[in-house]
Image (cartoon, rainbow, N blue to C red):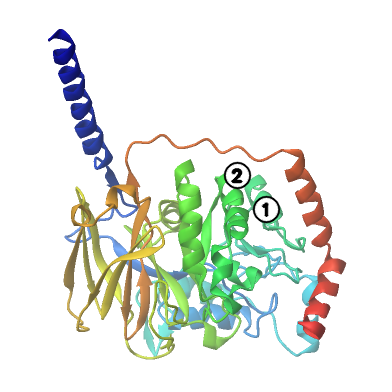
Amino acid sequence: MKKILCMLLCAALMCGSLVIAASAASDYTIVSPYADVVWDGDNAWGAYKGNLHTHSTFSDAEMDLNEMILEHYNQGFDFLAMTDHGVTGTPWNVAPARLPLYWYQYILGYKQTPLTDEEFAAVTDGTYPVDGKARGSGMTCVIGGNELNALTLTKCHVNGMFLPPHAGDNYLGYENDHEGAVRLADAAGGISFINHPGDWLNSGRDIAIVSDPANVKYFSDILLKYDSCLGMEVFNERNHVTPYDRILWDNVLMACLPYGKRVIGFSNNDAHFHSHIDSSFSVFMMPENTVENIKKTMHSGAFFCVTRELGGNDLIGPAEDFDVRYSETPYPAFHELTVDGHKVTVRANNCTELQWIANGKVIAHETVEQSETDTTYVLDLDKIEGAEDFLYIRCELFGEGGATISQALLIDDGTQPIEYVADTSREAKRASLWYRITSLRLFVLFRLIADKLFG
């Protein structure tokens, strides 16, 4: 009888443990980058339209510096960073470095002209006229931007931000070396993010490339190694060579989050021409439009990514390609994204579709009639099977005016992050040496010529 009672007691304890474990598995917190945003009321934060990746004739664009700045102002941008290739951005009334690499611009007849002191003052305080009237709100000048790796055939570009004067001037870079550029920004006390990774991967030709474990590991290792590297572009310009970068972002998120690294998604127009300006940009939620708040928001992720042109795909959409650049149709906009327990509330307008992504898959989708008035949507993760196993969720809006997506909201179940340790094995060192050899500029040039001739 004692043996039977002991067995029954053990069974009861085991069942109790299983119940506790099951409860613990669903005991998680949704951590939102928008948690501090004040959405309504007298102290509501503003939604500021901006771009952090822009070019002029001081590098390889066809628009003069003053023309590029004024056109962004005319199109309603609230902040702007000039990030010419290998040229560290200066106040807009001060000419940045004129590099020998871009002397050909003079031969082609292009000018290199900063704003006048009067134009700079009027643009930054909002008195510069648009259609004959003062705009009323200034455009904030973000200096210290530089698209590093200026002379690389492989386009392994990294945006260095908030760099000291001349820190990245004439940095030509090395082929296939994102890490070198990230290291430069880090050593200079700046921050960085990886530009148009799909352009480097040439993933526009095959969607499978952005899910290749080797490619995911390549970017994840850099992001995990450098805290100052905040993330990567998910929208770039017209997305015609980078249509699958948000899928790559999902894969990198899943690789980095177990280590406690939030990967921020960025969206920029990478403007070289007038036609690029109304393509992709960001909407920052901030109490005030200042450089300090812009930098803080880049770190927190309290902003949304917008694009006006995107190719379709069968994995996470959109169902069809769209291009609504320079149309008068407003883009879909978030007016609230709040968390209450396991429920997430979104209030948005100008959208026809809303979907939620978790671990790279669509977990909820809703089709609505587009309206200029706000519509409220609620995602209840308690009603989604397997939600306790998600690493993150994120929201996407599609409408007649383009697409707008949120940052990732993290699912925190209390598990301690894994410590990242770089692979220093002999095999890893051999692979690194071979990678460096195949990344020599001459090797890359011959490979590109061979691809053109025989590819």
Contact between marks 1 and 2 (CB within 8 A): the answer is: yes
- Measuring from the top left, give residue 125's x and y in whole percent: 42, 70
Crowding at mark 1 (Cα within 10 Å: few <14, some 14-19, many 20+): many
| Residue to which mark 1 is pinned | 179
Q: Is residue 390 above or below residue 16?
A: below
**Of the image marks 1 and 2, the number of the one nearer the N terminus:** 1
Kind of residue sitting beneath label 1: Glu
Q: Quadrant of the N terminus?
A: top left
**From this viewpoint, which residue is outermost toward the front?**
1
State the CA–CA distance, disc 1 to disc 2: 9 Å
Measuring 40% from the left and 77% from the top, which residue is drawn there? Answer: 127
Q: Residue at x 77, y 56 (%)?
A: 435
Out of 304 and 196, give the one closest to the viewer.
Answer: 196
Name the secondary structure under disc 1.
Answer: helix
Q: Is residue 351 visible?
A: no
Q: Position of residue 418 (x, y in %)?
A: 49, 37
Q: Give the residue furthest to the top.
A: 2
Identify the residue under disc 2: 225
**Camera sees residue 276:** yes
Name the secondary structure under disc 2: helix
Q: Nearer the viewer, residue 178 or 170?
A: 178
Q: Residue at the spot x=55%, y=82% of the render?
A: 240
Q: Say which amino acid is labelled 2.
A: Lys
Residue 414 vertical placement versus 99 (above, below)? above
- Classify residue 299 as left or right of residue 56: left
The quadrant the C terminus occupies is: bottom right
Residue situated in front as seen by the camera: 347 or 356? 356
Tell me which residue sits at (56%, 80%) in the image: 68
Horizontal side of 81 relative to 354 (left or right) equals right
**Few, some or many C-alpha atoms within 10 Å of disc 2 (few <14, some 14-19, many ≥20)?**
some
Q: Position of residue 279 (x, y in %)?
A: 47, 81
